[in-house]
Amino acid sequence: MWKEEDNRLKKTFKFSDFQEAFAFMTRVAFLAEKQNHHPNWSNAYDTVEIELTSHDAGNKVTDRDHKLAKAIDKILE
């Protein structure tokens, strides 16, 4: 579940290994590029942490962030 805190939508994703985590990040990268809305994220082995905020809206959570969050979740369905 995405949590909204500190003007960001945040979620942590766990995978079975680094390869699955990296494959997920690659798919998210294509989604983000298509929406021209890019996440702040980090990866450590099997864990991907994503934060979404709209820099052009004063670093606040907007509909663009919620739209990308929903699209990211659909990758894993």
Image: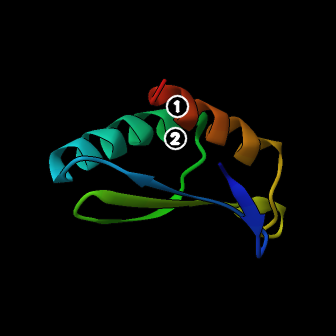
Residue at (65% x, 34% y) in the render: 70
Residue at (83% x, 61% y) in the render: 57
**Disc 1: which residue:** 34
Disc 2 marks a residue whose amino acid type is: Ala
Within 10 Å of disc 2 (Cα), the crowding (few <14, some 14-19, many 20+) is some
Q: Do the residues labelled 2 and 1 touch (CB within 8 Å)?
A: yes
State the image quarter where residue 66 is shown: top right
State the image quarter where residue 61 is shown: bottom right
Q: How many numbered tags mark residues here?
A: 2
The image's mark for residue 77 is: none
In this image, 60 relative to 38: left or right?
A: right
The image's mark for residue 32 is: 2
In the rendering, at what x and y percent does residue 6 appear? 76, 76
Disc 1 marks a residue whose amino acid type is: Lys
Residue at (59% x, 31% y) in the render: 71
In the rendering, at what x and y percent does residue 46 appear? 26, 57
In this image, 5 relative to 45: left or right?
A: right
- What distance separates the C-alpha of mark 2 from that of mark 1? 5 Å
Residue at (25% x, 39% y) in the render: 23
Q: Seen from this angle, which residue lies furthest bottom?
A: 6
Within 10 Å of disc 1 (Cα), the crowding (few <14, some 14-19, many 20+) is few
- Report if residue 60 is visible in the image: yes
Compared to residue 75, the image places residue 63 above or below, namely: below
State the image quarter where residue 55 is shown: bottom right
Compared to residue 47, the image places residue 75 above or below, namely: above
Q: What element carries label 1?
A: helix
Compared to residue 63, the image places residue 45 above or below, namely: below
Q: Seen from this angle, which residue lies furthest front?
A: 16
In the rendering, at what x and y percent does residue 52 appear? 64, 57
- Report if residue 54 is visible in the image: no
In the rendering, at what x and y percent does residue 68 appear? 64, 39
